[in-house]
Structures are given as structure tokens and as C-alpha cells.
Amino acid sequence: MAISVFELFKIGIGPSSSHTVGPMRAALKFATSLQAGKLLAQTQTIKAELFGSLGATGKGHGSDKAVILGLEGEAPEQIDPTSIETRLTRIRTQGQLFLLGKKAIAFCEPEHLLFHWQNLPFHPNGMRFSAYNTAYEAIATQVYYSVGGGFIINEEDIRGGPIQPDDIPLPYRFRSAAQLIELCEQNNLSISQLMWENEKCWHSEEEVRQGLLHIWEVMQACVRNGWKHEGILPGGLKVKRRAPALYRQLSAQPESSLDDPLAIIDWVNLYAIAVNEENAAGGRVVTAPTNGAAGIIPAVLHYYDRFCSDAKKDVPLAQTKAEGRRQKAEGIDADTQTTRSDRIVSFLLTAGAIGILYKENASISGADVGCQGEVGVACSMAAGALTEVLGGTLKQVENAAEIAMEHHLGLTCDPVGGLVQIPCIERNAMGAIKAINASRIALRGDGRHIVSLDKVIATMRMTGADMHSKYKETARGGLAANVIQC
Ligand code: SF4
């Protein structure tokens, strides 16, 4: 299936793309299907059942809230995160919700929202919704799967194979990193330029540009919210938010303290921690490509925007050091203007291309392949994107993305208490630093490397398939099994 960059970068709410964003979208889709089938008036109640990883860790990940609000007609990108608790209190107190905001139906959580540990056949994140009439006869049933990054599919989508071909005529269709690079070479394009051409199949140029800049604005707002909001994260682990104190400490230091060669690391850590604390608190975040790993790409993009000198200039393309290097290496003779915003757009497009490779050839779901599919993929996307905007060649971009994943292979998903807090928040800070390092290693080389990005993606998929289910977002293994909760 052709995937747009806007499907990888989605504005939503925390704490989980597969467990919060996906279930909310599925519940909304089911409610909308009842309306389309003219069944709204007959519906007296709905039963929602969550299976597998959703059953095991759904409560910690806010799947219950997401389903309820999705049935009320909310979408992750539109809901006001500050309104959620009041609405849930009203629904829980009254024992009823407003289906699509239109029809009052009975909804008593212990009876109508059930969590099962067993899996449905296709994917560990299964959901079954059933609507009942006054005689408690089922009038509609639908099964959905939340397959990572907020993507959902239903059983019809799966018939004949999980990925249905579509007929969107992308000018540069790629299915592997090797193909992506070959297409770029043949057409004298960077990865971001190739993605730009593909995106124009769905949107106008203005929509692509403004859409991506809006994504960047939401990422920046998320960082600011993270360092503003004090307190303890919800869920019972009593994890204290660290971003506000860290922000105060770092901002109190004079700019000259950046002479400490490692001071920048503190800022990168702060950006990632701020985003992931917002995510853990159910705030507004951008899936990048998932919520659990939402801090890495914003942290690396903040790093580029603030600390890399080329990012600040609005100069002719050929005059930036980085672009000049890339053009020289790739024989490109361009004389266009590049602005700071252009390079933000390029960063997100390149990151998107790399994310698509993982989505199509492996998985971006922690329930499917462990944390290598979330933090590992985000790190790989960020490393490749940073390398392109810093002037890396195509081979260096591929190398950076490959290095970043190579050193996340086998990373398990073991959230303590089923909450996206420990180890997830710090893991994003580590992932952001690794992405920057992967990019630096690649930029110091000549692009030649032994392990290709395609090979590392295939290895990630196979490692995920061999991984025991207790390490795949079930909170039954690893740290989740060894850290005593009090
Ligand atoms: S451990 Fe990784 S995959 Fe699992 S919830 Fe945390 S960030 Fe997501």
C-alpha cells in the first residue's frame, strides 16, 4: 500500500499510538459505520473487547479512554486533551455515552469494555466491537487490528493478505532501500525530493509544505508543554516529571556553557524527555512513527535547528556548506534558494521515506516486534534525516539509518506496569543521542558499508518474529517483570 508521510506523522494524543490512537480511530470507525448503515437509532449499547497486547496493557496505555471517546465521535487529532478527564467522569457516573455525539446509549464499563489476554488471529492488537438493539441482539460486529503507529485495519482489509495493493500512481514507487537509492540516483534527486514528488499524488505542494511545517509546530509545542508541566505522571508508578527542572537548570546556564563539548547532549535529552513526559500524561503529541517513540525525531530536529549552523541560514542552496558537499558528491547543479523551513520539510520527508521502508518490510509495532520497531525505527528515521540535511550523500543517509537500527536489534518492549514511562521516556533520550551519533559516524565515512539498510530491516523483522511474546508490549517480561511496583 502506498503510504504518505502524513500517515507516519500523525497528530494525536498520548500515551500510545497502537494502544490509544489506533483504538480511538477503530471505535470512531465502528460508530461511523453504524451511522452509514442507518443502525444508530436501533443501537442500545455497544460491547468493545480488546485482545492480546491491548488486553494485557490496554489500561496502562489508556486504551479504555480511547475507545470510549472514539465511540463518542472523537478523533485523536481533534480531541482537546484537557477535556478528557471531565468527559470520562460524566460517562462513568451516568453509565451512558453519546454515540457519535448524537445518540445516548447504555455503557457500563465492567460489562461493555472487556480485556482479554488471548490474541485474535491476525495481530496481537485486536479489537472486536458489537452493537446491540433493545432485545440485546447483535446488529453489527466488526473486528479491527491496531498494527502500530496509529494504523488500523479491519478483517476486510486482511482478506487476500494483510496489505492490499492500491492504484495510486506514485512517480517513484520504492519497496526497498536499494530501490529508493537507485531511483534517487537515476533521477538526480535527494530522498526528500523524491518523497516530495510522491506526496504530490495526495496533496498540493502547498499542503505538503504547510502540513509538514504544522507537524513541526506541534512537535515544538509538545516540547514546550513538556518543560512547563510539573507533577507526577498518571498511572500509579509515581514517576516525577523531570523536564521542567532540567529546563530550568539548562536555561540558567550561560550560553557560553555550551563550550562544554557535551552540553548539547543535555539539551537533546531534555527535548526527548519533555515530549515523552507529555505523551505519558496523555497530552498532544505527533506519532513519529509511534507515540512511545515520539520524542526522538523532535529531539533530533530541535538539535539540528538549534545547534547545527547550516540550519539557521536562508541562503542559496549551493552556498550552504552541507548542501554544497552533497551536490558536489552527487554531481547536482542546483541554484535554488533553501530556507530553514525547507530544511525542516526535507528532514521530515527523508525520515518519512525511511519509516515507510520499515512499515512495509517489517513493522513499527512494539506488540509485533518489540521496542526495536518503535525506538529503533524512530532512531533510524532521525539518523537518516539528519544526515541528509547535514549534506550527506545518499549512501551516507542509508548508512546512518542502518547504523541506528543495527544497534537497536533485539530491543524488547517491557514497560513497567504497562505504562509508557519506564523505560520508554529515557529510552527516547538515548535513541535521540544514538541517532545523532549514527549520523556523525556515517558523515565521517564515504558511504561504503557492509550491512545494507534492507538487510538490517529484514533482520529486525526476523528478530521480532523470534522474540517471546512476553517482550512484546504485554508487560510480562524484562523490566516489567523485575521491577516491583508499590
Ligand atoms: S518499551 Fe518501547 S515499544 Fe514498549 S511501550 Fe515503551 S517505547 Fe513503546
Image: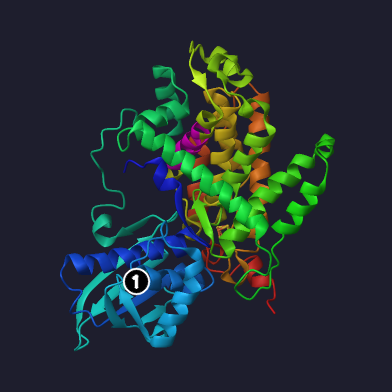
Residue drawn at x 38%, y 61% as measured from the top left: 75
* Looking at the image, residue 235 lies above or below residue 374: below
Left or right: residue 358 versus residue 320 is: left
Camera-side residue of 397 and 107: 107
Residue 294 placement (x, y as % from top left): 55, 52
Q: Is residue 95 left or right of residue 395?
A: left
Task: Identify the main secondary structure in magenta.
Answer: helix
Membership of 346 in magenta stretch:
yes
Ligand 1 rendered quadrant: bottom right
Quadrant location, the C terminus: bottom right
Question: Quick one: 417 or 209, which is closer to the camera?
Answer: 209
Q: Nearer the viewer, residue 400 or 260?
A: 260
**211 magenta-colored:** no
- In the image, residue 457 sits, relative to residue 195, either above or below, namely below
Quarter of the rendering containing residue 120: bottom left
- Residues in magenta, as a range: 345-357
When the figure is inspected, residue 410 is found, relative to residue 28, above or below; the finding is above
Q: What is the three-letter code of the residue carrying label 1?
A: Glu
Mark 1 element type: loop
**CA neighbours of label 1 inside 10 A, class few (<14), some (14 to 19), many (20+):** many
Q: Can you give x and y, in whole percent of width and height, for residue 407 in the image?
A: 63, 44
Q: Which residue is mark 1?
A: 72
Please identify the residue farthest to the bottom as the structure is shown. 135
Residue at screen point 36% across, 31% down: 205
> The N terminus appears in which quarter of the rendering?
top left
Residue visible at 72% across and 45% down in the picture: 267
Q: Quadrant of residue 395?
A: top right
Residue 112 % position (x, y): 36, 82
Q: How is the image coloured?
A: rainbow
User: Which residue is located at x 55 percent, y 14 percent?
Assistant: 318
